[in-house]
Image: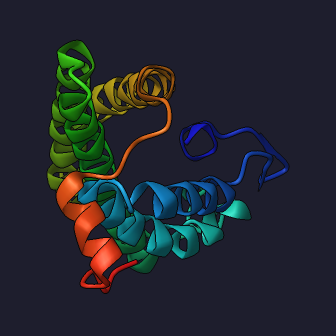
């Protein structure tokens, strides 16, 4: 996940490519999806994010430079990317909440709930305000900058949450209902 939140560029080439981060997340969530339904759904959002983040590798969808005209296509692609990321984080945190509740770790579940709520609020507000920012007065655009900073801090808190969840939860045991459906062959999603 760190690869998806941090960007280090040298001459417009991202040294920590998002698509590798989403690929690794999708791979890990494939295994975790056998244990928690929410992780399986999160994996479903990680897969398209692999491909949607590829243009960012060479900064095709990046912020326009003064000589480049505004591109509605890249702007729209960025909004779709943000919406999928929002859904991905929602289900990722929901999986942590569920696993923490089953493992009797209420503090971890509460932390995941807070991280999820803050990320959803900030990303949701950014998604709503971004199209409006095209015609907003400059003062309103400062709100988007503030939301971006809060979103970055929220992303860091999610990375720390994932690390903490990995330490506290360790290897997850399948949900008893899900385990029975896997063993009986009824679960077609595995």
What residue lies at 55% left-to-right and 42% top-to-bottom?
1
Q: Position of residue 164 (x, y in %)?
A: 45, 20
- Residue at horizontal 22 percent and vertical 44 percent from the top: 94
Q: Position of residue 51 (x, y in %)?
A: 56, 75
In the figure, is residue 126 to the left or right of 88?
Answer: left
What's the residue at 49%, 64% (across, down)? 30
Instruction: Please state which of residues 103 and 45 is positioned toward the viewer in this rendering.
Output: 103
The image shows a total of numbered marks equal to: 0
138 and 151: which one is in front? 151
Name the residue: 24% across, 18% down.
105
Question: Compared to 135, does 45 lie above or below?
Answer: below
From this viewpoint, is residue 138 visible?
Answer: no
69 lies left or right of 19 = left
Q: Position of residue 8 (x, y in %)?
A: 73, 38
Percent position of residue 81, x then y: 39, 64
Asked if residue 171 shows in the view, the reply is yes
Which residue is at the far top?
107
């Amino acid at each position: 996940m760190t690869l998806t939140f941090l960007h280090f560029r040298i001459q417009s080439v991202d040294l920590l490519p998002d698509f590798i981060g989403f690929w690794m997340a999708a791979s890990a969530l494939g295994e975790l999806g056998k244990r928690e339904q929410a992780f399986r759904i999160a994996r479903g959002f990680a897969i398209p994010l692999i491909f949607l983040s590829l243009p960012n590798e060479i900064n095709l969808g990046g912020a326009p430079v003064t000589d480049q005209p505004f591109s509605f296509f890249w702007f729209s692609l960025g909004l779709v990317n943000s919406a999928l990321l929002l859904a991905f984080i929602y289900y990722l945190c929901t999986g942590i909440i569920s696993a923490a509740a089953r493992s009797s770790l209420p503090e971890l579940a509460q932390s995941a709930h807070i991280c999820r709520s803050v990320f959803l609020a900030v990303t949701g507000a950014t998604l709503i305000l971004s199209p409006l920012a095209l015609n907003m007065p400059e003062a309103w655009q400062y709100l988007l900058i503030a939301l971006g900073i809060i979103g970055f801090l929220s992303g860091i808190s999610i990375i720390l949450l994932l690390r903490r969840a990995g330490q506290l939860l360790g290897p997850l045991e399948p949900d008893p209902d899900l385990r029975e459906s896997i063993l009986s062959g009824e679960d077609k999603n595995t």
